[in-house]
Amino acid sequence: MNDREQTSKKRHLIVTADDFGLSPEVNEGILKSFFGGIVTTASALVTMRHIKQAARFVQNTAMPVGLHLDLFEGEFPHNDEGLFGRGGFMEDVLNARELRGERISLPPQISNKIFREFWRQLCEFQDMFCRRPDHLSYHWGIHYIPDVLESYIRFASEEHIPFRYGAQYAHVTPTYPIHPDHWSDTFNGAANIHEAAFLDIVRNAPEGIIEISTHPGKYSPDAVYQYNAEREKELEVLMSRSIADSMGEYNVSFISFGHIPELRKKT
């Protein structure tokens, strides 16, 4: 594709900052990248201990915040059977599928409990943020578990909430169309965190609604999560003035998930 074809495509770009609520340093980085950078929405982890700080920070602001559904890492008050969290059954299922390529089908009773956990997290989000989420997304790779991905899409449809969806991971085709046309999750890892890499994603994206997921944050010397120093590098790119100025060259307009329903009406 030549430069003229690349710039003639009309793209609507959502830049999502994941993991809002993970730590004070991540919260700070996300706020900086929204109010001073190109991030257009954040995804909040209600299972994390610093989520209340995140909710306080965005009170009385127009910053769009979605719900980052989590089954693997945070704190789960209704988890007597050990399904969720670190070392839980669902983490074992994810590792079996993602790392070893094993196919594990979940019994209906576990799928139902996952759906109820999604509902619990939605209720908690609404209690803390006093609003409906801008969107739904998910923490870690539930797209590797077809039963969970199907529950996630059904949950978004039943709640009428725009949602993250990557056709590259699809096991089901959503009948509920309120999602981006393309999702890029490649802006991460030390080798990929630089301005040229971000611009390549935009330049090569198809026409339509595009989501790029990101993980900005400040470095934390006390972090228990592995992806730490990389977050500050992401923040630097997302705050770059040259990145923002380049969007006009590629016929890109910035939006949040909340714009998707209206855009779908026009197509």
Image (tube, grey):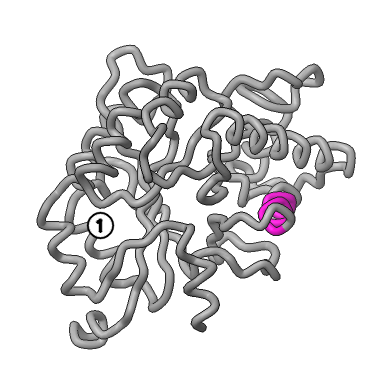
Q: Is residue 250 above or below residue 147?
A: below
Residue 173 highlighted magenta (yes or no): no
Q: Which residue is mark 1?
A: 198
**x, y percent for residue 123:** 67, 34
What residue sits 88% from the left and 44% below the top?
108
Task: From the viewer's perspective, tell me whether residue 162 is left or right of residue 55.
Answer: right
Q: Foreground: 230 or 214?
A: 214
Q: Is residue 17 above or below residue 242?
A: above
Q: Amino acid at mark 1?
A: Phe
| Residue lying furthest top | 222
Which residues, given as a range, are shown in magenta?
Answer: 150-157
| Residue lying furthest front | 60
The secondary structure that dominates the magenta segment is: helix
Residue 152 highlighted magenta (yes or no): yes
What residue sits 31% from the left and 49% below the top?
39
Q: Is residue 146 visible?
A: no
**Image quadrant where residue 89 sits:** top right
Q: Is residue 211 visible?
A: yes
Around disc 1, counting alpha carbons within 10 Å, would you say few (fewer than 14), some (14 to 19), or many (20 or more)? some
